[in-house]
Image (cartoon, helix red, strand yellow):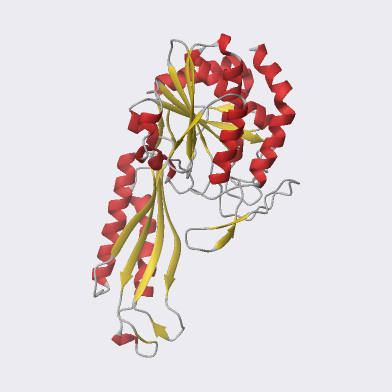
Amino acid sequence: MKELGSWLDETRKEREALYRHFHSHPELSMQEHETVSRIAEELAAHGIETTRVGETGLVAVLLNGEGPVVALRADTDALPVKEDSGREYASTATQVDNSGTEVPVAHACGHDVHIMSLLGALQFFDAHRDGWSGTVVGVFQPGEETAEGARALVRDGIAEAIPSPDVYLGQHVLATLPGGHVGVSAGAVFTRASSIRVRVYGTGSHGSMPELSVDPVVLAAGIVTRLQTVVAREVAPRKTAVVTVGALHAGTKSNIIPDSAEMLINTRAYDDDVAEHLHEAIERIVRAECDAARSPKEPEFEYYDNFPLTDNDAECSERVREAFDSYFGKLSQEMEPVSASEDFSIVPDHLGVPYVYWGLGGFADPVNAPGNHNPAFAPDMQPTLDRGVEALVVAARGWVG
């Protein structure tokens, strides 16, 4: 597609300047008001109309005759992270989070690259309508980092805002692929994940009188140790699972035995059955340890930050891979599954359509590249920006070309 290469050359300076703007003006999940307004302005400047879905969701629909409907998704939110990338356009932004605390904010997961990729793809398709037929839908999704955004789009009526797509496509810039490479594979590529807040109860006492207590610190410590056996002894070696206790909070003073303890647990799995088993095992172990410790009250479980499995459709993945191989050559590769998680699949699952989600290499030196969510995460501007546009256009033309 010579016209795509020429368009990228002609628009590169403008796109890089806009990327710097988005990178240095990040916004937290479900607070992407300025971001989505700027996206709408940029599309309007090219004659592309947009529709809000909820407060910070945005869709654009390009109609171009008969043919399939392809939806392309980009997430728009940033993280409560203080950037330490050394880029001259690094974020110094702060924002008030949901707890009322002012926090630093940075695009430490590359969603600004995703925004620019989808903006570029929509502008290219609009400017080169003689090269395709059908409908291209752009979905700018808020709140991926908190798993709120895709569910918000569903709740706020995305099914009525866009024509029913034949396929739903998306990508994520990663440090695990070489810079400029694209990687796609069929099946499970991102894990199902859940966070669980567990509170266990004891009986408080003076530290000098432990016999009068039921010590929740000792109880929690036993639970943490026992949870390590779930993956080691309850999940088959051919399966992948992760159980992490990321926080344990109890007590206020060295000589006071508290009356409760809180644990924050995270689970990951590439299989829904394995994920359900992890949850059952955690609750079983917690309850059993509480019984053994004579806990005076039942433990409490709160599930949050629930991310679904990202499980690429086999036939559609093969079509995307063929398109990538044809266009990118040796820069197209199989993507290994990534143990991170995404809410990408919630919208296509709600719409009842197949989907494909692939990786985009963001660093020339992937061995020493910072991982996503690292304060230093800021992909190489090029060829990442160009490649992100190319990947969306090439994949979409597998249907509308």
Which of the 4 quarters of the picture holds residue 380?
top right
Q: Residue 7: x and y, percent?
A: 68, 19
Instruction: Name the residue nearer the viewer: 297 or 286.
Output: 297
Image point (37%, 79%), residue name: 258
37 vs 5: above or below: below
269 vs 254: above or below: above
Q: Residue 218: x and y, percent?
A: 37, 74
Residue with the most extreme bottom position: 208
Quadrant where the image shows the N terminus: top right
Instruction: Name the residue nearer the viewer: 219 or 394.
Output: 394
Horizontal side, residue 401 vs residue 389: left or right: left
Image point (36%, 68%), residue name: 222
383 vs 108: above or below: above
Count of numbered circles in the view: 0
Which of the 4 quarters of the picture holds residue 299?
bottom left
Q: Is residue 337 visible?
A: no
Q: Residue 47: x and y, percent?
A: 58, 24
Horizontal side, residue 303 vs residue 361: left or right: left
Q: Residue 145: x and y, percent?
A: 49, 47
Q: Is residue 102 visible?
A: yes
Image point (29%, 87%), residue name: 212
